[in-house]
Amino acid sequence: MFNQTFSLDNSSGPYFLSRSLYPKDLIIGAVSLVGTFILFGVTQSREPRLARLKCQYPSLVPVAVLGLAVLIVHALGSILVFLWGATIPLAVILLHAATRK
């Protein structure tokens, strides 16, 4: 009798993705990132000090907002899942773009 076992062929990709990507955690990460940017935008429009800070240090503000979003996602316990869900599609897109003729 033939015994089917899990092998590292074409079936390993979907199996690995189904075990490592959790939609709930991806949604939590995406919502917290978007919420952080929206919160900063609203706060910047109401507080002139933040608008001046953005003009004086243009690269500091996105880094600070992303840092705050990472802290929020980390506090929710899903930072690795969100990073995996965000970087794998980007890597596939870049790989596809690099191999096009």
Image (cartoon, rainbow, N blue to C red):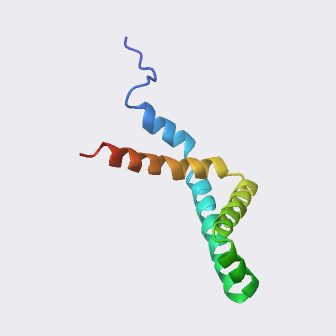
Where is residue 38 drawn, in percent x and y?
63, 76
The residue nearer to you, when weighing 9 against 61, is 61
Q: Quadrant of residue 42?
A: bottom right
The residue nearer to you, when weighing 79 against 54, is 54
The residue nearer to you, when weighing 51 against 77, is 51
Where is residue 58 drawn, in percent x and y?
64, 71
- The residue depicted at 63 percent of the width and 60 percent of the height is 28
Quadrant occupied by the N terminus: top left
- The residue depicted at 64 percent of the width and 47 percent of the height is 80
Q: Which residue is farthest top?
A: 1
Quadrant occupied by the C terminus: top left
Where is residue 40 drawn, in percent x and y?
68, 76
- The residue depicted at 44 percent of the width and 31 percent of the height is 12
Where is residue 82 drawn, in percent x and y?
59, 52
**Relative to 81, does residue 55 appear above or below in the rendering?**
below
Task: Tally the numbered discs.
Answer: 0
Q: Which residue is farthest front?
A: 56
The residue nearer to you, when weighing 8 against 45, is 45
